[in-house]
Image (cartoon, rainbow, N blue to C red):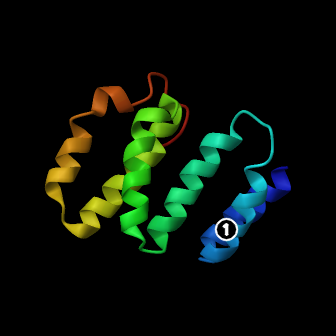
Amino acid sequence: MPFQDGMINSFFFLDYYDAVEQHLEVFERFEYDFVHESTKINRATTKARKKEYDVAIPMFRSYIDELHKENKIHVVNELLEIQLELGNMDAIEEVLMKEKAILPANPQIPF
């Protein structure tokens, strides 16, 4: 299983987004606790990198409400990056207004 996750990350950082999406199809079948949310985040992030914002933005917005608090920071970072690129300051303000609900209580990651 770590091999599959490592391949996805490698393809992602090489900008091979179609390969990422193919491997996510396999990865999401694994029955580990973290797979479901990780797959969602990776799928939406891949859409964002492919500039498919019309797909990525609604995905990220829904994930702010449904993912565990520890994973929301990844979603918010990606969403803010898209909105900044698009110059959508109102959407950025909307996300920042939810800061208390988004930030993890005990952050364990550098983000």
- Name the image quarter holding residue 86: bottom left
- Name the image quarter holding residue 34: top right
Label 1 environment density (alpha carbons within 10 Å; few <14, some 14–19, many ≥20): many
Q: Horizontal placement of 66 versus 89: left or right?
A: right
Instruction: Please state the horizontal and vertical placement of residue 32, each as a whole percent of the image.
Output: 78, 36
Instruction: Please state the horizontal and vertical placement of residue 71, each as a whole percent of the image.
Output: 52, 38
Can you name the residue that lies furthest to the left here?
90
- Name the image quarter holding residue 104: top left
Q: Secondary structure at mark 1?
A: helix
Judging by the rendered image, the residue that carries numbered circle 1 is: 20
Number of numbered discs: 1
Q: Horizontal placement of 45 versus 64: left or right?
A: right
On screen, residue 70 above or below 28: above
Q: Horizontal placement of 107 versus 77: left or right?
A: right
Query: Going 50% across and 60% down the picture, which residue do you hit?
Result: 45
On screen, residue 98 above or below 21: above
Which residue is at the front of the view, 65 or 83?
65
Which residue is at the front of the view, 19 or 78?
19
Instruction: Please state the horizontal and vertical placement of residue 4, each as a whole percent of the image.
Output: 81, 58
Which residue is at the front of the view, 50 or 2?
50
Can you name the residue that lies furthest to the top here?
105
Query: Going 42% across and 50% down the picture, which residue do you hit?
Result: 60
Query: Going 50% across and 57% down the picture, which residue do you hit?
Result: 44
Instruction: Please state the horizontal and vertical placement of residue 74, each as a whole percent of the image.
Output: 47, 46
Query: Going 31% across and 54% down the picture, which residue do you hit?
Result: 80
Amino acid at circle 1 = Val
